[in-house]
Amino acid sequence: MKALLYNKKASPHQLIYCDTDKPTPSDDEVLVKIIAVSLNAADYRSMKMRIIPKKKIFGADIAGCVESVGKNIRQFKPGDDVLGDLADYGFGGLAEYALAPERLIVHKPAALSFENAAALPMAAVTALQALRDKGNIQKGHEVLIIGCGGGVGTYAVQLAKYFGATVTGVCSAHHVEQTYSLGADVVIDYTKEDFTKTKKWYDIILAVNGNYSVLACRKILKPNGIYVAVGGALSQISKSIFFGWTMSLGSKKIRFLVAKANQKDLEFIVKLAENEVIKPVIDRYCSLDQAAEAMSYARQGHSKGKVVIKV
C-alpha cells in the first residue's frame, strides 16, 4: 500500500510518500480502507518530540470502510463505514489501510461525508471533554475560548453554544469572521486588544493555544470559575500542570485536560454533526502524496479549522 512514512533523514519534511506493507488484522482488530484523514497537533508535536509510531505512520483521525475484521470483532463487519481516533493505538492513518481496535471507532452515518467525518474525532472530543468534564459547563455560563480558530477551538465555540453558554472567542483578525459565523457572541482580536485587561469575568476559560499567563487568566475568572488548558506552547502546558494546583487553592480552579478517545463521546459528537448542530471547519484538502507539505502547513498554526487528507 501507499503511505506517508517518517524518515528523520528525509528533507525537508522528514516524511516520505512511499510503498509499505499492507497490515493484516489480528483477532481483535479491524482493517480499515482509509478514505480521509485529518491532521492534528498530536501528529506534528509527536514528530517534534521524536515520539514516533512503531510503524512510522502518523495520522490519528480516520474515516473509511471496513475491509476485514478479526474473529473477535462483534460491532463491525466488512463494508461498514467508520470513523475514529487512532492516537492511543499507534496512529497509522496516513496510509491506504490502517488497523484499529473496535473500541476506538464508530459507525459513520450516511449523511456525513468521509471528509467531514475524518475532521471530527480528536478535536471535537477534546473540546467536549474540556468544556463538559473539566469545565462543568452550564447553561448561562460566560465562556472565554482562547485560540478559537483552529480545530479544537472551532468545535469549542459550537459546543459551548450548544450547552447554552455565552461565548467570547480570542483569535487573530484572520479568524474573527469565521468565529462569529460559528455562533460566538463576542470575538476579541488579540492583536488589537488584551483580553486579560478588560473588565469582564468568565465562568470558564478554555485555553486551546497561545502563551498567555495562567495567573493573568485566573484574575478574570469569576468566583468558582475554572481555567482549562488543552494545548498551547510547551511552557504554558508545563505551568498548567506543575503550578495549577497551587493556583487552585480557593474557589478558582486551574485544570489541564489530556483527552481520551472513547466510543461514547465520539458517538455523541457524530450525532451532533449528523444533525448539523456542529459542523467541521475545513481549511483545505490535500492528497496523500501532498500530506508532508500539508503537515508543515498545519504545524504553522494558522489554519482555519482542520486540514484533511483525501486518501
Image: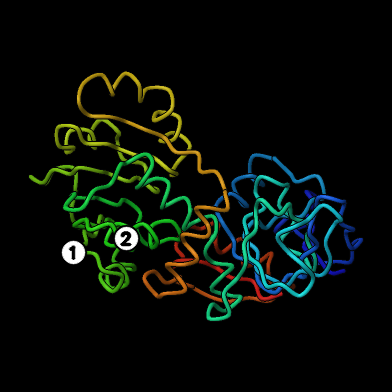
Q: Which residue does the image show at 64% across and 44% down from the upper left? A: 46
Q: CA distance from mark 2 to mark 1?
A: 10 Å
Please indicate whether residue 210 sits to the left or right of residue 68 in the image.
Answer: left
At label 1, the amino acid type is: Asp
Q: Nearer the viewer, residue 23 or 285?
A: 23
User: Does 173 sit above or below residue 191?
Assistant: below
Q: Nearer the viewer, residue 218 or 270?
A: 270
Asked if residue 206 lies left or right of residue 59, the reply is: left
Contact flag, marks 2 and 1 (Cβ < 8 Å): no
Residue 185's label in the rendered image is 1
Q: Which mark is residue 157?
A: 2
* Dot 2 or dot 1, earlier in sequence: 2
Task: Tally the marks.
Answer: 2
76 relative position to 195: left or right: right
Where residue 94 appears, as percent x and y from the top left, is 72, 63
| Disc 1 secondary structure class | loop
